[in-house]
Amino acid sequence: MSYIARVSSKGWVVIPKALRQRYNISPGSKIVFTENDGHLYLTPVPPNPIASGKGMLQGYPLVETLLASRKEEVKNEEEICF
């Protein structure tokens, strides 16, 4: 879905109500502006960024993957040395 907003003489842009509701943007909310390849992105900052990231890596076997990788490195090092 696309929305069009007009920029005021002060550089203000009103975020459409539907988007404010969908992304929980309320007065005092922080927004990050990111420029990339000629595009401008607006990203709402959660009130507590640490808490919002909790559990985002759940289901990824990070420790097991790291240990398996290290075992493979040790095996390769032993083959080279002996």
Image: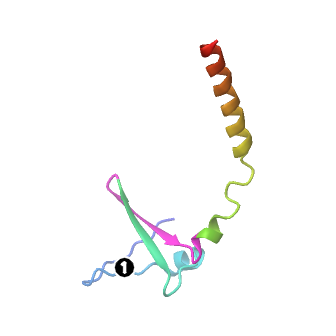
User: Which residue matches tag 1?
Assistant: 13
Expressed as whole percent of the image width and height from the top left, the position of residue 9 reads 24, 83
Residue under the point 66% across and 26% down: 74
Expressed as whole percent of the image width and height from the top left, the position of residue 67 reads 71, 37
Seen in the image, is 31 located left or right of residue 79?
Answer: left
Expressed as whole percent of the image width and height from the top left, the position of residue 56 reads 67, 58
Outermost residue, top side: 82
Amino acid on which disc 1 is placed? Val
Expressed as whole percent of the image width and height from the top left, the position of residue 40 reads 37, 62
Seen in the image, is 68 located left or right of residue 33?
Answer: right
The residue lying toward the viewer, choosing from 22 and 36, is 36
The residue lying toward the viewer, choosing from 21 and 42, is 42
Residue 44 on the magenta segment: yes
Give, as a single range, the part of the protein colored magenta: 37-49
Category of crowding for the residue at label 1, using alpha-carbon neighbours closer than 10 angstroms: few (below 14), some (14–19), many (at least 20):
few
Above/below status of 50 relative to 6: above
Seen in the image, is 35 located left or right of residue 20?
Answer: left
Instruction: Indicate the quadrant where residue 80 lies.
Output: top right
Above/below status of 29 relative to 36: below
Above/below status of 22 relative to 71: below
Outermost residue, front side: 82
> Mark 1: which secondary structure?
loop
